[in-house]
Amino acid sequence: MGIAVEGARKRFGDFQALDDVSIDVPDGSLTALLGPSGSGKSTLLRAIAGLEELDSGQVAINGQDATETPAQKREVGFVFQHYAAFKHMTVFGNVAFGLKIRKWDKPQIEARVHELLQLVQLDGLAERYPDQLSGGQRQRMALARALAVEPQVLLLDEPFGALDAKVRKDLRTWLRRLHDEMHVTTIFVTHDQEEAMDVAEQLVVMNAGRVEQSGSADDLYDHPANEFVMSFVGEVNRLGEHFVRPHDMTVSLDRDEGAEEAMVQRIVALGFEIRVEFVLGDGTEVWAQLTRAELQKLELREGQIVYLRPGQVKSFSGDVPPPEGGGASTPRSPDGGEGAEVSAAA
Amino acid sequence: MEGHPAALTTSSAAPPAGIRLPGLGVDLGRGLVVLYLSLMVMLPLAAVVAESTSGGLGAFWDSVTGSQSMAALKLTVICSLIVVAINAVFGTIIAWVLVRDDFPGKGAVNALIDLPFALPTIVAGLTLLTLYGSDSPFGLDIAFTRVAIVVALCFITLPFVVRAVQPLLMEMDQQMEEAATSLGAGGFTVFRRIIFPNLLPGILAGVLLAFARALGEYGSLILISGNIPFDTEVSSVFIRSQIESGNVAGASAVSVVLLAISLALLIAVSLFARWGARK
Amino acid sequence: MSTPTTAKWGLRTLAFGYLGLLLLAPVGMIFYKTFEHGLGPPIEAMTSPDAVHAIWLTLLMVAVAVPLNTVFGVGCALLLVRHKWKGNAVLDGIINLPFAISPIVVGLSLFLLYGTTGWFGPTLSEWGIQVLFSTPGMILASVFVSLPFVVRETVPVLQEIGAEQEQAASTLGANAWQAFWRVTLPAIRWGVAYGVVLTTARVLGEFGAVTIVSGSISGETETLPLFVAKAFEQFNEEAAYAGAIVLALLALTTLLLMSVGGRKAKAQGGPIPITGDAAIPTSNQKEGS
């Protein structure tokens, strides 16, 4: 059940927005479509909703082929980035809209609308107009509106994109809790990896109209399929052919075998993390993430020479010689895929 | 809408599946629209063009270049030019006063600008005649003169430049003027170098529209101008007289000339607006 | 930048002087002239059978032409804004044509189509339909000259509100008609209303085209503007001024509606520009009658 997309293709003029995309969204799950602008994630979402017609491919909702069904009949709830509020109707009118279309009778509508407004914590604002609400309130209204008709699927297109950072974080938590309560199959689109990792059970990373990888946040973080996923989900340093997470960088004052010489360029304190920027002998700039304790122990200063040894390293391209020294290395499959994991003595 | 860059950047550009014209398919709706336009506009115009050349191009040319026709055309064009020049100046002044100045009754004055749009032209002509014709309390009598034509056309085309300049003035960032002043520019210089160039697109557009309007004006002129051939007869009046004397082909020929000029003007305005929108 | 005081008063004098001489004084004069001898004569003039018929006929023109052009206008605007098509630019241009055509030419064109030697005239009269010198022709003329207004005023508002609300309605289960009626139309209503006001004003004031098409037969095919012209030409000044007053009062009402409606249309959606925004001239232009 859930949602299945098979071989979706869509082109806008010269631009291939979706290039043979297939995804599986389990019933009742909360999935994020994550990717940069132009990756096709919004197009995919809209295709699932029926707001875009695919050039080829299929969309199945709860086991039934919905490819030819118009948006009106798909029973998907859709929440737009800029709310798409019915400006000339009150909050009550907005939320009741789908119910009026389905010809529910008045007392039923009243009950349901108030139930939903309570759920989204907008009870009491039923008679206001959208332009009298804040952005966060409008988005909650849009959610209530979409949920009112008990959709099979809930689709959110960058729902928090137009809101302030603080409001975004609050609504994120709130959406998660809402999903825990309602268990509607939910897909949301975002370009913010932190948001995706925070909220979603499953992430689908897209790039240039294709799916790069899908899996849980841990899967993608620890076992990225390629360079794009690794750098999009989490931070990454590039050392030649290798990719290292900043918190996997070991900084030492001793010249160990296999360590790279580097000069401290800049030390920035970001909350409880410290970001230390280095420049290597060949001019490459990398950075490491340290805790305050580590920083104090090392007593790092700008201009100081230190020695960096990567902890876990990934490579994605063919045969690459293992990093010098270090511990045991395991040979990799020739086509890259998952890189070798080199454990090193910290 | 096609051709407007800004409109096509929203997600609403590509029609989503399922959003059709209410009750009809898009194609049927389009068909009806085209049918309506053909019946109401295109066919009638085609008839005029066809009639104008019904006696061959030679006859077309003769009709247009006949002495009375040429006199009317010349008069029409020259009067229209004078009028748009006057209204370019006064229209800008009025727009300035309405936007930058404040006084009691401003709203009423602003609404009044649209009077020439709302008032039937025959009434406009009548009112001007009453005030400036033989019964004039001022002792003026411009009835049956070319001055009358100019006055009437000024009335008719007053709103064009005003309404074109107003939004530009309202949107204008006054900080530009403040910057110029802080750099030492005096009032007139600021106007000449900062304000005027920014208003120019509006003034030009208003002028072009006003000119197209003035070319075809009829109702306000027939009472006040006297319609004297070779003297105060404008092209629209001439065309009418040709229809009445049965020279429909000749009337059509001159009509086509007027049409061509007005069309060229409209196209200029729309190209203009596109250029302005792109800036 | 606030203009220095002398400049300010100079500009004011020029502006008010021009407006006063050109607009106010003439209109004031008409009111004076009409009621110069009291209320009696004008009322008498306006209640004569010919006058009453003229008023009725004028209102009939409005009652037919305005709804036609409104339905067309809204439908056309929807097509142009929501549905990409290569021919849209051409469609747009054609819609603007009535702004470029002298009303006399409009009359001529209808004469050429429906006159006794016209393209359709003979066939239609065989079927018993008379277009010229009769109401249908006058309606056609009124529709022609007032065609663009509703389209012109609806398009920017439609563009401004965007299609997302309609898409939202669709996902909530509304079909095309429901989405239009419950979501689109309320959102654009002030733009449409403004267009309707402009259309009405234009039809009320139409003169040149109707003159040719109707033959101006008193008591039959004479609208109020034609009535005023004929009365004046026949030296019946009282009737002419009385008719003019009625038209002027209608015009002032229109002005009021334009002022109110225009502001609301602006607030709701597109402004009413003459330049910029839409690629074609929009706004409150009216070609002459």
Image (cartoon, rainbow, N blue to C red):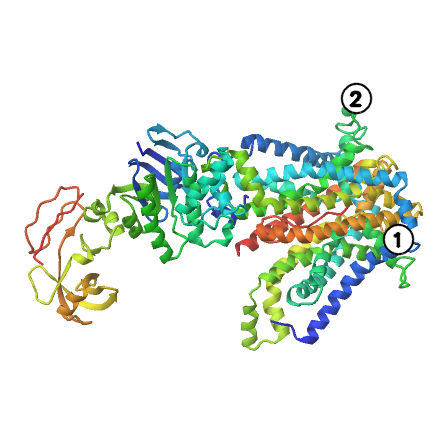
User: Distance between the Cα atoms at labels 2 and 1?
Assistant: 46 Å
Residue C34: assigned label: 1
* Badge 1 density bin: few <14, some 14–19, many ≥20, Cα 10 Å: many
Looking at the image, is mark 2 or mark 1 earlier in the sequence? 1
> Is residue B191 or residue A86 the one in the foreground?
A86
Q: Are marks 2 and 1 in contact (CB under 8 Å)?
A: no
Number of disc labels: 2
Residue at the far top: name it.
C126
> Is residue C280 or residue C32 the one in the foreground?
C32
> Is residue C167 or residue B248 the one in the foreground?
C167
Q: Chain of mark 2?
A: C
Q: Residue at x 57, y 68 (%)?
A: B174
Find residue C253 and report its horizontal and vertical position in percent. Answer: 75, 50
Q: Is residue A262 left or right of residue A95?
A: left
Find residue C183 and report its horizontal and vertical position in percent. Answer: 54, 41
Q: Is residue B197 left or right of residue B257?
A: left
Q: Residue at x 76, y 41 (%)?
A: C105
> Is residue A43 or residue A87 the one in the foreground?
A87
Q: Secondary structure at mark 1?
A: helix
Residue C126: assigned label: 2
Q: Chain of mark 1?
A: C
Name the amino acid type tagged 1: Thr
Question: Toward which corner of the image does residue A276 lie, by quadrant?
Answer: bottom left
Q: Is residue B222 above or below residue C28?
A: above
Question: Toward which corner of the image does residue A344 lie, by quadrant?
Answer: bottom left
Name the amino acid type tagged 2: Glu
Q: Residue at x 14, y 42 (%)?
A: A334
Q: Quadrant of the N terminus of chain A?
A: top left
Q: Nearer the viewer, mark 2 or mark 1?
A: 1
